[in-house]
Image (cartoon, rainbow, N blue to C red):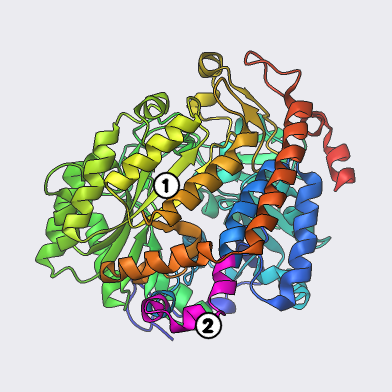
């Protein structure tokens, strides 16, 4: 039993909501890939692999994704094997490594989408169950939940493309239920829609504005859906799309405080780390990013510093120790950041927090130190590249000097830094990769996450006709691959896995920073005093790969050959002036459903 946030004690509780209505909604969140949240235990791995095969069968291009996953798999396998060896057990850094990986996991809390939807449904008097796609890998759990719930809300937020979403929706669809698909992926692809078999409704835009409409639809016995006041309903390729419309004004203070006490009551445990969101959209237009177009409109909207502070004080009093800010950029507007930090400092900085930050903001004198004093522990920085020419091509409105100074300022302030790197953006060459390495050696971050340039989201500025012509960019645009093929004047996607592997190994061997996939699990427990020990551990596990290294070398050569042929086959007739429409996109809804 608990006191509901914003309500008098005893007025309402979780149990009483269970008997309020006859229908129940199943909320399903999470990703879908093997090696991610889909596999939680050995007992679910067969189901998970079967689902992954379904995704691969639907996908129009898989080999770049496979090769990139092999790069991460090599490191993770090396870590597992090395920790079993006598050398590790005797190593002087063992205590630091054990301490790091025993800290709280970043993925211990439910997704914010689940918490928001659960709270919204509760306000509408509709009971709910909640799970992830990983949880549904267990057949008994899946059959029970789908049997109990007449309606399923599916979040596509962590889905990478339609090849993941389509087979998962097919699995959830039952003769007795209705399936509603919402979230970031479908909101991004609404203008260039692909039929999703089994989806009774597709919700586009603000979930907070759509749930009341969906609740009325459920209570009416699933009659025709009525759109929100500023929204609309559109029939497209056999699916019904419901649009929320856009809110008035730029303030998000009208959004209700996500009810994490409700989530704790449902899951039967407390969450010391919770997820939080304070902005929608982004004021910048980086060429590789789709975040400004995440919803139907492109306006940047924010919560005020006072609203954020009041929400966080509720969570701190409820037992939260750290708040993970999921915004595209938390450091803008700068006036809001300063006001929030001052409010937190005045209150004694009662809760820790992490956020995504822009290098240019952190490069300003005093900003990193102010954030640290206000309780910030970790900043994720979009570093992307150390080559100024590539950075200019990205339209980052920043320079490599900002990247360097931001890392210097954060280290001086005691803020942990985790940067993202993009390999393969137009202008990338072997020389630019070496320049990135040199810049990172000049001012090292604590952790780095490397990834390949990806063209799966059609709303990215770099995929618009003028940009395609400028860079000689040829792409696959079909929404049915998480890593569609591309090539441009200076690089092809077939070069990315080897380029990323070289950069990762160089960073490890030269002890520049910790590789993200190896150290993600204990990220919240990073202690700068253990940095040298962790870097030594990382270098040793790579150096002692032995015969495994040659096996992975051979595997990458084979994958590169397969990828080279498949890229040639898929892109040989495409020019920068044309868009590729694969047969999957041109198929009718009936043909898509028949193909599974």
Left/right of residue 334 with respect to residue 145 in the rendered view = left
Q: Secondary structure at mark 2?
A: helix
Question: Which corner quadrant of the image does residue 468 belong to?
Answer: top right
Q: Quadrant of residue 299?
A: top left
The answer to whether residue 325 is visible is yes
Asked if 370 appears above or below 473 in the picture, the reply is: below
- Residue hosting label 2: 86
The residue shown at (71%, 50%) is 554
List x then y, in percent, for residue 165. 69, 50
Q: Is residue 6 above or below residue 266?
A: above
Quarter of the rendering containing residue 309? bottom left
Horizontal side, residue 147 vs residue 516: left or right: right
For the point 60% across and 52% down, which residue is it? 71
Q: State which region is magenta.
A: 78-97
Seen from the viewer's position, the closer of residues 521 and 248 is: 521
Q: Residue at x 44, y 55 (%)?
A: 509
The local secondary structure at tag 1 comes to strand
Where is residue 204? Give x, y as percent.
57, 42
Question: Rounded to the nearest whole Å, what is the CA distance between mark 2 and mark 1?
Answer: 34 Å
Identify the main secondary structure in magenta: helix
Which mark identifies residue 403? none
Residue lying farthest to the bottom in this orientation:
1
Q: First in sequence: mark 2 or mark 1?
A: 2
């Amino acid at each position: 039993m608990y006191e509901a946030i914003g309500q008098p004690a005893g007025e309402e509780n979780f149990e009483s909501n269970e008997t309020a209505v006859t229908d129940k909604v199943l909320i399903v969140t999470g990703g879908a890939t093997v090696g991610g949240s889909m596999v939680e235990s050995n007992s679910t791995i067969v189901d998970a692999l079967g689902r992954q095969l379904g995704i691969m069968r639907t996908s129009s291009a898989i080999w770049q994704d496979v090769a990139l996953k092999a790069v991460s798999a090599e490191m993770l396998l090396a870590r597992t094997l090395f920790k079993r060896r006598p050398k590790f057990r005797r190593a002087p850094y063992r205590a630091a490594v054990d301490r790091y990986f025993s800290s709280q996991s970043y993925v211990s809390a439910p997704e914010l989408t689940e918490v928001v939807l659960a709270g919204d449904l509760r306000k509408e008097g509709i009971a709910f169950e909640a799970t992830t796609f990983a949880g549904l890998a267990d057949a008994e759990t899946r059959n029970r939940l789908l049997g109990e719930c007449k309606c399923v809300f599916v979040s596509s937020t962590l889905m990478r493309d339609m090849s993941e979403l389509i087979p998962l929706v097919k699995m959830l669809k039952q003769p007795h239920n209705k399936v509603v698909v919402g979230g970031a992926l479908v909101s991004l692809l609404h203008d260039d829609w692909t039929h999703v078999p089994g989806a009774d409704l597709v919700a586009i835009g603000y979930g907070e504005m759509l749930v009341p409409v969906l609740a009325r639809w459920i209570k009416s016995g699933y009659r025709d859906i009525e759109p929100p006041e500023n929204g609309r309903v559109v029939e497209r390729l056999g699916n019904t799309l419901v649009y929320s419309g856009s809110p008035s004004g730029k303030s998000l203070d009208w959004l209700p405080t996500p009810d994490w006490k409700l989530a704790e009551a449902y899951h039967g445990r407390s969450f010391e780390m919770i997820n939080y969101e304070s902005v929608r959209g982004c004021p910048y237009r980086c060429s590789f990013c789709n975040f400004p177009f995440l919803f139907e409109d492109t306006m940047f909207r924010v919560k005020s510093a006072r609203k954020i502070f009041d929400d966080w004080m509720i969570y701190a009093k409820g037992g939260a120790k750290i708040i993970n800010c999921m915004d595209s950029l938390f450091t803008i507007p700068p006036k809001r950041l300063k006001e929030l930090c001052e409010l937190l400092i005045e209150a004694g900085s009662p809760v820790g927090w992490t956020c995504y930050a822009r290098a240019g903001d952190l490069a300003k004198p005093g900003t990193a130190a102010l954030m640290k004093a206000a309780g910030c522990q970790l900043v994720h920085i979009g570093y992307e590249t150390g080559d100024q020419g590539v950075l200019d091509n990205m339209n980052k409105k920043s320079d490599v000097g900002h990247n360097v100074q931001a890392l210097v300022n954060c280290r001086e302030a005691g803020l942990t830094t985790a940067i993202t790197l993009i390999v393969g953006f137009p202008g990338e060459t072997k020389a630019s990769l070496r320049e990135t390495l040199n810049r990172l050696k000049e001012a090292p971050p604590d952790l780095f996450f490397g990834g390949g340039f990806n063209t799966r989201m059609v709303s990215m500025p770099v995929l618009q006709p003028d940009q395609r012509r400028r860079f000689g960019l040829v792409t696959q645009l079909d929404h049915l691959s998480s890593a569609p093929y591309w090539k441009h004047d200076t690089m092809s996607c077939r070069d990315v896995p080897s380029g990323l592997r070289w950069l990762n190994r160089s960073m490890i061997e030269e002890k520049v920073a910790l590789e993200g996939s190896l150290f993600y699990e204990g990220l919240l427990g990073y202690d700068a005093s253990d940095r040298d020990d962790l870097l030594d551990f990382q270098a040793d596990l790579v150096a002692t790969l032995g015969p495994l290294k040659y096996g992975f070398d051979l595997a990458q050569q084979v994958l590169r050959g397969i990828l080279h042929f498949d890229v040639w086959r898929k892109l040989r007739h495409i020019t920068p002036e044309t868009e590729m429409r694969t047969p999957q996109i041109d198929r009718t809804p009936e043909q898509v459903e028949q193909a599974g």
